[in-house]
Amino acid sequence: MIQESEVVTRKVQSVLTVHIQYVFKGGFFVKLKSINMANQAQEISKAFDNTKETEIYSLWKESGYFNPDKMKELLGDKSKKHFGIPLPPPNANGDLHLGHTCGYAFQDLMGRYNRMTGHPTLLLPGKDHAGIQTEAVFTKLLEKEGKSKWDMGREEFYKQCYEFCMRMMTNAMKQEKRIGLSADWSRHLFTLDPRLTDIIYSTFYKLLDEGLIYRGKRITNICPHCKTALADIDTERMEIRGIFAYIVYPFEEEADRSEAKKLWGHEGIVVATTRPETMLADTAVAVNPKDKRYKKFVGKKVMLPFMDKALPIIADDHIDIETGTGALKVTPAHSPIDYEIGLRHKLDVVNVINEEGKMTGPIPERFKGMGTIECSKTIVKELDGMGLLVKIENIKHEVAVCERCKTPIEPIISKQWFVDMKPLAREILKSLKKGEVKVIPSGQQKALEHFLNNIQDWCISRQLWWGHRVPVWYSGGKELYDWKIDNPEKSIAEFTKETGKPIKGTGNVLKGDLQPETDPDWKGKPSDLWLEAETDMFDTWFSSGQWPFSTLKGLGGDNFEQYYPADVMETARDILFWWVARQLMLGKYITGKVPFHTVFLHGLILAEDGSKMSKSKGNTKEPTEIFDRYGADSLRLWYYNESLPGSNVPLREEKIKGNRNFVNKIWNASRFVLMNAEALGLKSLRSADVPLNSDRIKKTEEHVERIKKYIESYRFNLGAETIREFFWHTYCDKWIEEIKKEISEAPEGSKERSSSIAELVYILKENLKIMHPFMPFVTEAVWQELKKIGLADGILMVEQI
RNA sequence: GGGUGAUUAGCUCAGCUGGUUAGAGCACUUCGUUUACACCGAAGGGGUCGUAGGUUCGAAUCCUACAUUACCCACCA
């Protein structure tokens, strides 16, 4: 009689002598474990333990083969053309999210594959200083500590922000290593690294010398909170409650007034606006030329309340007859669309809002210094008192807000540095046509062409403290230089007359390594010269747009000559225009060659419910959580399967779990093969033992070729699917079972037995190699186990396929 | 308004340049205490490929229109 919980060991007769332990539980025998008597001492763990990943990563790193120079030594004559990917530098102000690790998974797959096919491979890592974003993050951090950047001063702020970034970077690098990124850490760079600065600057100078950079007056998004210009991409849309005010602008001529009174019940044209305070800067009223209501008044004038100024009524096709009253008050200084109308009709530009969002300029004293909202309320009240307010509607409308602090942006005319990108864009259009660059998926290539064909001038200046300073000095001061731009026909002598300020310089910009501010004894400074350094910073994309060549040039030596151009740019598709396009344009402009021949865009990772992941929604998932639970290989495989070019993929944990099962399958099948190989006394894989003509080996060779083709044509999903299908359902389910039988039927110690097991080991190794780029950790772990019993050498990472 | 995609099994998605009976993972049903693995194995159910036309010997695949949907750009007085 067997008692509950009694352990029973049963000896099983087979190739190996195996004892199986069962425990009697609830009326059943439940298998506890099998004990391989032949090598009980060397029992390998039953499931792949992903905490081993750190160890495996160190093995790779210590080998030195992340460095392509070392790879060249190893490969010797067999070394083919190098392969390179400038890794997109993540922002140095926070942790990585699943999108970053997705990119790394693809970059690393390509890197590992090329390394295993004879190409010394450079995956060049780095971090981006991310100007405005980091400044916002760090400023908020300071505010929490009760500090302010304004008290701290520019230099101290820069210093502390730099230290902050350095701290954040180490965290990010840990995660980069966990996904298995085989990057050359000896070449890791930060975009603000002093080695890169000169290269960034020389690009600016080249553009400036060739007349492609100019300082211009433009309507620009200004964030009154951050006090800087913002690119459109730095803004987002938000719905807010607002007002829609209908205001009468009376006609100048008595005759028109009475006619208007008859027609509409008011003595003038009624305009509708969401921002009454901007009326102080109006310089025209515009109507659609086809609008019958206003046709006869075009060319006449109306009086602008508060300002006692006559505004012309102009006709412009852009005006929508249906919106509001069909008559638009034109405020060129504070509305982008009005600015365009102003340009077409040569209207005056009057600035009444400053960069802090306060009323300013030639307006009645009582409004000066008011915030825009306060001013709007006052104006509406006063208009009502004057009988010029028709009605107010409460509406909901979308406004642009600062992406970082959510403050509504003010469109303000200001002077900024611009790059004329048209000539650069034309070059890339040519390259696309010639096939020097291709984009995967091809639909995005069309989008890129469309963008390049309609390219706008690029505002590269930001009023920040964090980033690269625009490297110019103004002879005679910035004010004089800007005055010259506004008054091209006047001589600088008139500057003093107009402004009452002395002229101490030529009014030009100077380049070069001048340090007049920090070096009071600056030699060569004439006493009558005043040099003012530019305080604006570059847009972050201006430096990251040079990443593929600035890094290699900055590293010095013959890095640039050896490794430029790179091969692939692998990134998310939402930054195709902002980053990829600019890398292409600046890269070709500076070096004459496109920086890479292939742009591969992976999909966007969404939250489980299909919405966009964002910290504010709280639906983000930490990569660390996934690594801990399922291991890096499982996550990688999920990316390859799901994050296809041009798609958006919701995160599916069950799928990652399924991949974890596959990782375990590899581990266990290998464990079985290893145990048998050892038990059968297979000491090495001499070629004589391996039946190279066998059907199974031939099929394996075909399989490997097929996977290679998939990788080379960037069809990673098919590769990932096929390695799984082949290993699991052909190798494990069919061949291992077949060979089990063959071995047990062959006489002990026979040649057939050793040949069979050798075949099994050989095919396993071939599979490990081709699976390695997809799932580097488990394959390397198995390889190292094989190595322990003499069936493999070195490390799998540099094994050649 | 302009651009680029997507629509295939209950769910998430593959299916290259048109060619056997349309696939995978997960989920589901039935069976299984085998010398690796239950994170396993065997067998199975489930789809008129968004709709309507067209090209073709042949269409999930190419063309046209429509519907639904996602993203990007521009704009919203």
Image (cartoon, coloured by chain):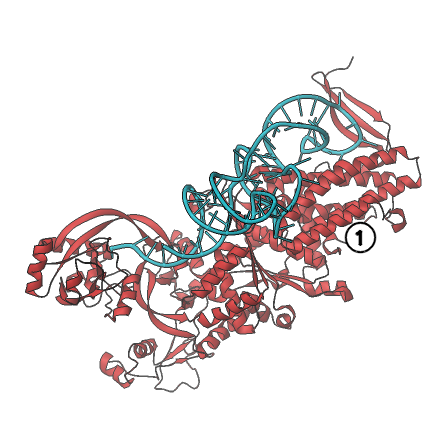
Chain colours: A red, B cyan
Residue A775 at x, y percent in the picture? 67, 47
What amino acid does circle 1 point to? Asp
Residue A566 at x, y percent in the picture? 61, 65
Quarter occupied by residue A674? top right
For residue A563, side relative to residue A191 (left or right): right
The answer to whether one can see residue A405 in this image is no
Residue drawn at the location 69% of the way across and 63% of the way down:
A120
For residue A557, side relative to residue A152 (left or right): right
Q: Is residue A642 above or below residue A472?
A: above
Secondary structure at numbered mark 1: loop
Q: Where is the C terminus of chain A found, in terms of image quarters?
A: bottom right
Q: Which residue is mark 1?
A: A793
Quarter occupied by residue A290? bottom left
Closer to the camera, A149 or A704?
Answer: A704
Q: Is residue A602 above or below residue A2?
A: below
The answer to whether one can see residue A136 in this image is yes
How many C-alpha atoms fall within 10 Å of the one at disc 1: few (<14), some, or many (≥20)? Answer: few
Q: Residue furthest top?
A: A1
Residue A755 at x, y percent in the picture? 88, 43
For residue A474, side relative to residue A331 (left or right): right
Closer to the camera, A55 or A14?
Answer: A14
Residue drawn at the location 45% of the way across and 58% of the way down:
A134
Residue A140 at x, y percent in the picture? 40, 54
Number of numbered discs: 1
Q: Where is the N terminus of chain A found, in terms of image quarters?
A: top right
Q: Chain of mark 1?
A: A
